[in-house]
Amino acid sequence: MAETGEPGTAVDTAFALCRDLYTRMEREMRESLYGMTERANRVGTTADQVCYRATVNQKSLELLRSWLSPAQLTQYDREGQFIVVGSHSKKRYLITSGAQPYNVIELGKNGWFKSQAAIKQRYCFVPSNGARAAGDVMLAQKIALETDEQAALKVANTPMGYAPPLAGLTWTNNDALLEIEHVDPSGHP
Amino acid sequence: MKFFILDQTGHSTLTFDDANVVDLEQALTEFNDLVKERKFTAATRRKGETEYTKVKTAQELQDETLFVPALQGG
């Protein structure tokens, strides 16, 4: 084998190259592992938060169900929304999913609507203490409209101009309204 | 007697023993704090019933009471 330069220098150079390579690989692996750990922690935290929110949401929906009148519960189980009667005006409001903005819909006189244009007005009001689980929001809206409609509407926001369409809105029907009239003609309470 | 208080955890439940004077005093204190100080709306009903009434004094409380915080525009 032909030798170039001094034998000791070539070995030293090769050793130095190996050491550099090893150091770089070690650093890259450590950084990679650190990054993976960080990502794993983030994913874990997110998963915990998702589980916690799901639990809170479930808890709030159970409470909501326990405070709905029989007619409202029937409609809620069927459509995921329910009608309440305003304590003052006796107008009917449809409370849809509390996870959406402007989820309180004032219905026309006959309560029937088939298009966004037929909705008289939409409102949005929520608990001021940060309770934002869907069931809590819907329950707060129900109690407010049934006990102090005017105060609720006073603080409520209404859409300015275009309001986003409600996702997954089920068109309510006259059967649900008739049930309300039959079970609870005077409204709550 | 049970209090359901809407909060960020879904709701909190407080249970008071109707036969215990200390418990009743605690319930009264809690009611006054929520309704008079923090402006919660209180809706009360008998156990197992769905009809409720809005109350402003602790003397009107029934078996289960729901406390709804003041509202704001969403």
Image: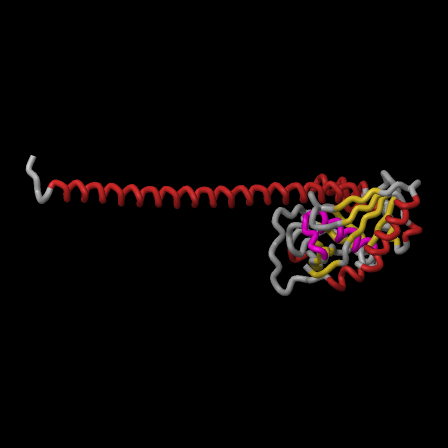
Q: Residue furthest front?
A: A8
Q: Residue furthest left?
A: A2
Question: Where is residue A40 shown, x and y percent of the image?
Answer: 49, 42
Query: What residue is shown at x 74% (from left), y 55% (from top)?
Result: A107
The answer to whether residue A183 of the structure is visible from this angle is: no
Is A40 or B74 nearer to us in this picture? A40
Which quarter of the rendering shows the C terminus of chain B?
bottom right
Question: Where is residue A31 shown, x and y percent of the image?
Answer: 39, 45
User: Does the magenta segment cover residue A70?
Assistant: no
Question: Where is residue A18 shown, x and y percent of the image?
Answer: 24, 41
Which secondary structure dominates the residues rendered in magenta?
helix
Number of callouts in the render? 0
Span highlighted in magenta in the image = A129-147
Position of residue B17 in the picture relative to residue A164 (left or right): right
Is A164 or B69 nearer to us in this picture? B69
User: Does the magenta segment cover residue A133?
Assistant: yes
Is A2 or B29 nearer to us in this picture? A2
Query: What residue is shown at x 66% (from left), y 46% (from top)?
Result: A170
Which quarter of the rendering shows the N terminus of chain B?
top right
Query: What residue is shown at x 81% (from left), y 55% (from top)?
Result: B34
Question: Where is residue B25 shown, x and y percent of the image?
Answer: 90, 49
Is A9 or B57 nearer to us in this picture? A9
Query: What residue is shown at x 83% (from left), y 42% (from top)?
Result: B15
Q: Which of the colour schemes (rainbow, by chain, secondary structure, one colour) is used?
A: secondary structure
The answer to whether residue A1 of the structure is visible from this angle is: yes
Position of residue B30 in the picture relative to residue A62 (left or right): right
